[in-house]
Image (spheres, rainbow, N blue to C red):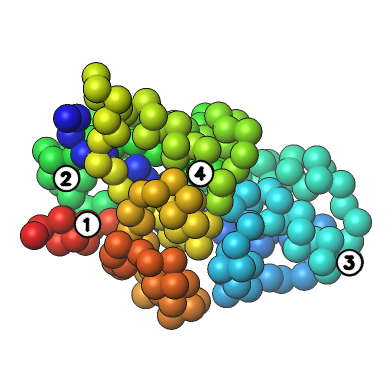
Amino acid sequence: MKEPLLVFDMDGVLVDVTESYRETIARTVARFTGVEITRAQIQDYKNRGGFNDDWELTHHIIREVGVDAPFEGVRECFQRVFLGNGGDGLILRERWVARPGALEKLSERFRFAVFTGRPREEADITLNRFAGGLVFDPVVGMYDVEKRKPHPEGLLRILNDNRDSSGQACPAFYIGDSVDDARCAREAGVPFIGIAAPANPAYLDLVFLFQAEKAYAIVDDINYLEEVFAS
């Protein structure tokens, strides 16, 4: 049987996106509406489920405020803020969560993959920047699936691609930071490990949501994964 597989969501799991994606949501909403939305409000939307796509979430907030902005215009503004001109985009504010050696130690026992709601090209930018020495195979992103999270299509694709010669699926875990991630794992029949950072403005709500989804484990961040698999 193949080595067990850890499938990571990216935003809020491998990378802290507080000052990148979350800030981009806030700035884009402000540009269209003049309304300053807080990080706590953004997290409240995430906790409702169905808002894994940050473009759609931003568009939804703008329309909820009362501004009838076209989706494509919102998306284009969002991307300008996030990617910038190569030297000033908020993507450069992302912070890699894993401490030096943490994932390298896990890689001695597990293989890694990524199933993320961001486009694969943007995922590759961040992985190449922070984790060039690690192998994440495959990386499944937004445009690699027809149905997005919480639908399990991307996760099931990874599992099906990792069957042994007899057709047996290898043991796998999905690691995510949202209720959509938890529901995706449940629908795929994969144990879910929830990331609930104490600094999250809706930390307790998120913990309760993960518990309701029967999470295999709940940890502060991926640096605690070694303890989850210690026994």
Callout 1 crowding tier (Cα within 10 Å): few <14, some 14–19, many ≥20: some
Residue beneath label 1, please? 225
Q: Closer to the camera: disc 3 or disc 4? A: 4
Q: Amino acid at mark 2?
A: Leu
Frontmost residue, 143 versus 88 = 143
Frontmost residue, 21 versus 57 = 57
Query: Closer to the N terminus: mark 3 or mark 4?
Result: 3
**Residue contact at pointers 1 and 2, CB within 8 angstroms:** yes
Q: Secondary structure at mark 2?
A: helix
Q: Is residue 72 left or right of residue 189?
A: right
Q: Residue at 60% across / 62% down in the picture? A: 49
Residue 23 visible in the snapshot: no
Quarter of the picture containing the C terminus is bottom left
Which mark, by number, is residue 152? 4
> How much space separates mark 1 and mark 2, taking CA atoms?
8 Å
Q: Position of residue 102 (x, y in %)?
A: 18, 49
Q: Secondary structure at mark 1?
A: helix
Q: Secondary structure at mark 4?
A: loop
In the current view of this chain or complex, which residue is farthest to the left? Answer: 231
Q: Amino acid at mark 3?
A: Gly
Query: Closer to the N terminus: mark 1 or mark 2?
Result: 2
Residue beneath label 2, please? 106
> How much space separates mark 4 and mark 2, taking CA atoms?
25 Å
